[in-house]
Amino acid sequence: MKILFVTAEAHPLVKTGGLADVCGSLPLELMRHGHDVRLVLPAYPTALARARDLTCVGTVDIPLAPAPVRVLLGTMPDGQVPLYLVDSPAHFAREGTPYGDERGQDWSDNAERFAVFCRAVTAMALERVTPGWRPDVVHCHDWHTGLVPALLQLEPAATRPASIFTIHNLAYQGLFSYSKFQDLLLPSGLWRPDGLEFHGKMSFIKGGLVFSDWLTTVSPTYAEEICTPRLGCGFDDLLRRRRDRLCGILNGANYEEWDPGNDPFIARPYTAQSIESKAENKRHLQESLGLARDEESPLIASVGRLVEQKGIDLMVEAMSELMERPVQLVVMGNGERRFGSALEDAARQNPGRLAVHVGYTEELAHQVEAGADMFLMPSRFEPCGLTQLYSMRYGTIPIVRRTGGLADTVVDADATNVAAGRANGFVFEEPTQPELLRAVDRAIECFAETPGTWRQIATTGMAQEYSWTRSAGRYRDLYRGALCDRPA
Ligand code: ADP
Ligand code: GLC
């Protein structure tokens, strides 16, 4: 099958979170299953710099773009996955993230930017830009790509590719005003309640939710949750109506990049058999972050975007109580300034015990996973979550709230699960401070008083198989099903 994989980010070209990890790994895994997969992204400066062997293979005129948009073809940095870049310098030649400037302010023309991207991708999918390669399936990810299924369904069913839309996070919807909709020069028929209109605004993600042939999301539990008012973000009714077209496929982890036995970023590689070498990584991390050298106290880590989704507000509220316990804490991430400043204040009040790194580097993320004992993830919702999977692989025991992909991957260390040898973490139910602290206390007690059980939980996590192999097979089956649905 020929698959066009459409995304706003892919590691190692450009990354703000797990979307990039997924889109950087899944295409290669699908290629290993024998499919002809091509990735397409906007031509951001870092993508242009990191991609290999780019040449211009066509141009497309898009009403919103001041000049013909060039389509470049090359490969990902690994030299394996073919990569298209949609090159409209007026929209993408900027420093910053894919969505905003370095201070975190969204670009004011994001609607135009991703509309240009989606228009170019639609033309490519219909073989109007690059003759000779016509995808059978167009697989789109998150709101930035939501106009592609909307534009494709305007074409005769027999001549367009099947479309699949994956929801990585329903909370980001690409909402813009009606006048923006008019500026985008989209077909006016798309403005209707069962089209792109959403409570008087235009919603990019709705294009994917309404018009794609199949919908997926990144864990079975999140697939259930988004069909309820609590986590449906206003789309639960629509999603319930499309329930027979929605499936939850758990993300995989890229164990080639996240392998404690072979990780160029960490001080001392280790495996489940040599898990005591984690201690050296812990010492190294304590030193590099200015934490006191302390082998006795557990080191708790948090790596993630500083947003309410991740329960950072809960962690901030619980900070003084957390610091009353015999623990050290390292928090790394960037996001909302209020959380960054609150955490930095707390770090000043707890020198040597709380290290805060506002920002993100891949290198430090690996060192934290290797050096910490526990990984705290009190998410209010979590479509899948990858960091808990990386933590498990590194023998760093996750403490998580039971939601979305966390519910699907972390097995609580209650007496029954421990006895059965399947516990791999600590799970709590409600996003409240007392519940979070109770889970942390259970983990501290286990760490301090039953080291044998602690080791068992850690090595159970390390042995867990959340690789892409199985999930890629599920996507392959879905692509096949989508093609069988097509008119002959
Ligand atoms: P999400 O996608 O919701 O941020 P995931 O757990 O799925 O959460 O994926 C997070 C991925 O992004 C991990 O590889 C993590 O190391 C990385 N990451 C975490 N915080 C940041 C950040 N501020 N900037 C870039 N990448 C980040
Ligand atoms: C989103 C979700 C996260 C998921 C990631 C990759 O960013 O917040 O839970 O793991 O996408 O699918």
Image: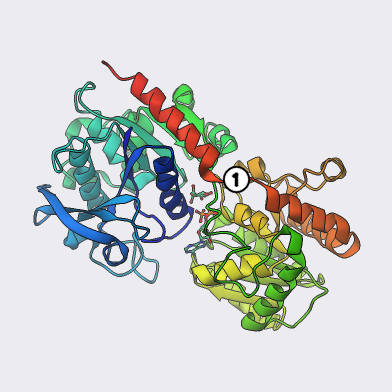
* The N terminus: image quadrant: top left
Label 1 lies in ligand 2 vicinity (Cβ under 8 Å): no
Residue nearest the viewer, comparing 25 with 182: 25
Q: Is residue 129 above or below residue 387?
A: above
Residue beneath the point at 36% across and 19% down: 484
Name the residue that disc number 1 marks: 466
Horizontal arrangement in the rendering, residue 3 relative to residue 412 (left or right): left
Residue beneath the point at 67% across and 47% down: 464
Residue nearest the viewer, comparing 99 with 200: 99
Tell me the quarter of the picture where residue 405 sits.
top right
Q: Is residue 436 above or below residue 120?
A: below
* The C terminus: image quadrant: top left
Q: Secondary structure at mark 1?
A: loop
Tell me the quarter of the picture where residue 483 sits.
top left
Q: Residues within 10 Å of mark 1 (few under 14, many from 20)?
A: many
Horizontal arrangement in the rendering, residue 444 relative to residue 230 (left or right): right
Image position, residue 60 (x, y; %): 11, 47
Outermost residue, top direction?
488
Determine if residue 358 is in view. Answer: yes
Residue beneath the point at 33% across and 57% down: 79
Image position, residue 454 (x, y; %): 82, 57
Q: Is residue 293 above or below residue 138?
A: below
**Residue type at numbered disc 1:** Tyr
Residue nearest the viewer, comparing 203 with 449: 449
Tell me the quarter of the picture where residue 414 sits.
top right
Image position, residue 451 (x, y; %): 87, 61
Scheme of colours in the image: rainbow
Q: How many marks?
A: 1
Residue nearest the viewer, comparing 454 with 269: 269
Determine if residue 236 is in view. Answer: no
